[in-house]
Image (cartoon, rainbow, N blue to C red):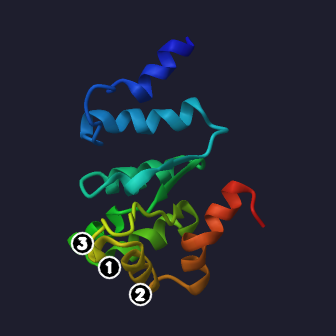
Amino acid sequence: MKGDLSTLYFKSNKEHALPTPDRIEDFDLLPVLAPETALIYAHMGGLFGFREFMTIAASHPNVYLDTSYSLVTIAQEIGIQRLSVYIKHLGADKFIFGSDHIIGLTPEWLSARKQIEIIMSMQELRREERELILSENAKKLLGIK
C-alpha cells in the first residue's frame, strides 16, 4: 500500500510535472491521503492552474499556497484587484509568501520585492491579512512565535 501511495505524487519522475488538468486530481487527492500533513503547493499552482489550486486549498484545511514567482504573472494576467478578491474570499490564512528570487539572476519584474509590492498594494486586504501572507502563516506552520 505504501508503494501505491508514493506513486501518486512522484508518478512523473522523467518529465517536468506541470499541473495539467489530468494531474490536478493528484494534487486534490494528496491532502485526503495525508490529512495531518500541512501541504504547501508552490507557485499557487502556476498561471494556468491557480484557480484549480485555489479550489483545492478551499476544499482541504491542510493545503496552503505559496506566492513564489507566479504571483507576479497571475496579477499581470487577471489584475491585482481581481487576484486580491480571490485571496480575500479564499482567506489570507491559506497563502504563504515565497520567492524563487536568485540574487543577480532573477529579473526585477519577478523579484521578491515586486511580489511584496503587489501584496502591499492589494487594497481589498486588511493590513492583518497582508501580514498573514507575508510572515504570520509561515511562522504558524513552522511553530515560530
- Identify which residue is drawn at 39% across, 65% down: 101
Toward the left, the furthest residue is 77
Which of 17/57 is in front? 17
Residue 18, by quadrant, is: top left
Q: Earlier in the sequence, mark 2 or mark 3?
A: 3
- Identify which residue is drawn at 62% across, 37% down: 35
User: What residue did someone put label 1 on?
Assistant: 80
Which of 99/22 is in front? 99
User: What residue did someone put label 3 on?
Assistant: 78
Mark 3 surroundings: few (<14), some (14-19) or many (≥20) residues within 10 A? few
Where disc 1 sits, the SS reads helix
Q: Left or right: where does residue 93 sit relative to residue 16? A: right
Quadrant that contains the C terminus: bottom right
Q: CA distance from mark 3 to mark 1?
A: 7 Å
- Identify which residue is drawn at 39% across, 51% down: 53
**Amino acid beneath label 1:** Ile
Label disc, if present, on residue 121 of the rendered structure: 2
Q: Left or right: where does residue 99 sit relative to residue 21? A: right
Compared with 133, 140 (above or below) is above
**Amino acid beneath label 2:** Ser
Which of 91/75 is in front? 75
